[in-house]
Amino acid sequence: MDKLAAIHIQDCHFAYTPESPILHIPSFIVEAGTTVFLRGPSGSGKSTLLQLCTGMLIPQQGQISILGQTISTLSASARDRFRAIHIGVVLQQFNLIDYLSVQDNIKLAQHFAKPEALDKHPDYLDELLKALHLSQNILQQKANALSVGQQQRVAILRALINRPKLLIVDEPTSALDEAAKTGFMEMLFRLQHLTDCTLLFVSHDMRLTQGFDQVIDLADINHIATSSMSTAHTGITTAKIKTAKGAQ
Amino acid sequence: MLFKVALESLKNRRSSVLLTIFALTISISLLLTVEHIRQQAKVSFTRTVSGVDLIVGPRTGSLNLLLFSVYHKGSVGSSMEYSTRALLSQNKNVEWTIPVSLGDTHRGFTVLGTTNDFFQHFKYGLNQPLQIVQGRAFAASNEAVLGATAAKKLGYRLLDGLVLSHGLGSVSFKQHTDFPFKVVGILAATGTPVDETVHIPLQGLAAAHGVKNHTQKSSFTKNIHADKHDHDDEHGHGHGEYHSSAEHQFSSIAPNPKYPLSQISATEPISAIHVGLTNPVAVLSLQQKINQNQEIPLSAILPGIVLNELWQLVSFIEHLLLGIAWLIVVSSCIGLATMLLASMRERTKEIAILRTLGAAPTRIFFLLQIEALGIVLTAILISLMSVTGMLFLLQNWLASTLGLYLTLNLFTLSTSLILLGILAVTCICTLIPAIRGYQDALTNRLQ
């Protein structure tokens, strides 16, 4: 397939302070339309990588392309708009603004993506609600009145409302119990299929890897984590673990 | 959408927001009140006299002469002779003159001895003439014309009687009871000291004083006794008891021929003369002539210029008050900024969410500015309403005790500028939390 990569990172260096570099990723590619499980324990530079992918941080060196757009060279405001329109993000917790209703939380996501991502399909929201087993009247409730599980599902809904091409999900299940986790993963895959987006799922919980096209260990792609401060660029570990897409 | 987020966010932090609004309301109300009273005081101060080109009095300081002859405050000490009036009238540029004589009171209200020229020529505000709304001007020497407030507060109606007290001040032991006056006219309200004044003819003033001091005594007392028989019910009792005698208002308004407006004695002492000129250009040369007169020691002042000088003196305090009020507003705005800054800690999460959704850091900056402006605008609205309400309630009290005549309309150019200034101060003070929010948004981590 000659599709553009959803995420394409090349020789990327990042450090908050020059003395302690966090990331050096020689190469990392996520094909468009695939589902990728990225394993990264906390402190491995996982959050930093996600912020680089969403354009909230830019690398000191190297290039990051998202959906064919080199976002590391865009202006700050262009990156913010790009994120609003093309990338859906679900975090471990604190996804929703407590004092706003579910509806307003969703509208807020649409607001920042205007006017490109105006919802042309009025049924889309209903479709998402149904797929996430959420009832219509949840829209009027305040976000802080919801259970953790409901909050995470609303977070998914909101992340998908602008029909992003890339969905980044970071430890979404850590606050859920086992039964809820399974249900959550099922919904996530169903929605990925429904919206045909690329899914980057970040977790340290290897029990959740089932069903993903690829499983990647951050330690394998991040040179700093693997070779501890080594400056050598040789012997790059496999950045891509190819798996047949149909093998799930 | 940003407005909605700001509104919901403020609602979420209700208690601290309400307290901040309360503090701001107090300080903004204070500032508006100070500014309003300052403006109105200036207006009511400078509108007291108009159309008078010169005020001539015995030699004294110009401020002193103005305060005494226009505001009836302080004292000139010496007096001048009535003959000066004729002397002034000889000048070809002089159109009219009003002699005024001060020094007596009636129940705390200034008594001004003058002639009918006063009602004819004295102007206030924007060249507005005095208006007699009830009754008429002097036709006999025992008649009085009351200012609006004096009439209202004393409860006098036409034909009520009154006696003078010697000296300024509400409590006086020396009363000129032998020569009572009769109210024949009431003036329309002017918002100037005229309202608080009892006007009597110079002849009457001389008579009231003369009864005590001069040989005329016997003839005047005789006249009064005769008068007492004519109006039996008018003189035996207190002043407020004649309201029911309505028939008098129509039947007895005619002047009593026993008290004619006779020729005024040339040596009669008077306090000042208001002068109107035919040719205002001549005012400076006439002033100089009077001030340099070797024979009679006189002072002539241009009321407009002295009013300005006087206001300059007062304006120091006025500016001080305004400055203090501004400082209080600024400190409340800093309080607002502190409240917003303190809330930033708990809002890092909220900012992270907004950032993740694609909100640029400038949006976070504006969100905080919108919140601050919302709070201040609310406070301004409440202040405008409460100050208007307060003025409405205090209006009469201020007018009667301080002589301050206030309008209820707060929307003047300078109040609008002050409100804009408050908004500007808000924006500047909110820069601190807003920039903090902006930086938080820039360095925010997804966690």
Image (cartoon, coloured by chain):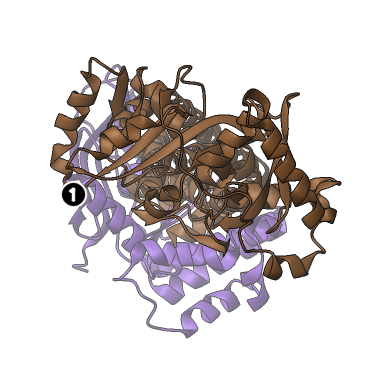
Chain colours: A purple, B brown
* Vertical arrangement, residue A218 with respect to residue B137, above or below: above
In this figure, which residue is indicated by the disc labeled 1?
A74
Residue A164 or residue B17, whichever sits in front: B17
| Rendering coords of residue A187 (x, y %) | 57, 68
Amino acid on which disc 1 is placed: Leu
B166 horizontally vs A235: left or right: right
Quadrant showing the N terminus of chain B:
bottom left
Please report, as a chain letter, where disc 1 is located: A
Q: Quadrant of residue A99?
A: bottom right
A126 horizontally vs B415: left or right: right
Residue B273 or residue B343, whichever sits in front: B273
Instruction: Please say whether residue A175 is visible from this viewpoint.
Output: no
Residue B126 or residue B410, whichever sits in front: B126
* Vertical arrangement, residue B97 with respect to residue B229, above or below: above
| Rendering coords of residue B37 (x, y %) | 50, 40
Residue under the point 31% across and 22% down:
B299
| Rendering coords of residue B321 (x, y %) | 47, 27
Residue under the point 62% across and 57% down:
B184
| Rendering coords of residue B256 (x, y %) | 64, 56
Residue neighbourhood size for the residue with mark 1, other residues' Cα within 10 Å, grouped as few (<14), some (14–19), many (≥20): some
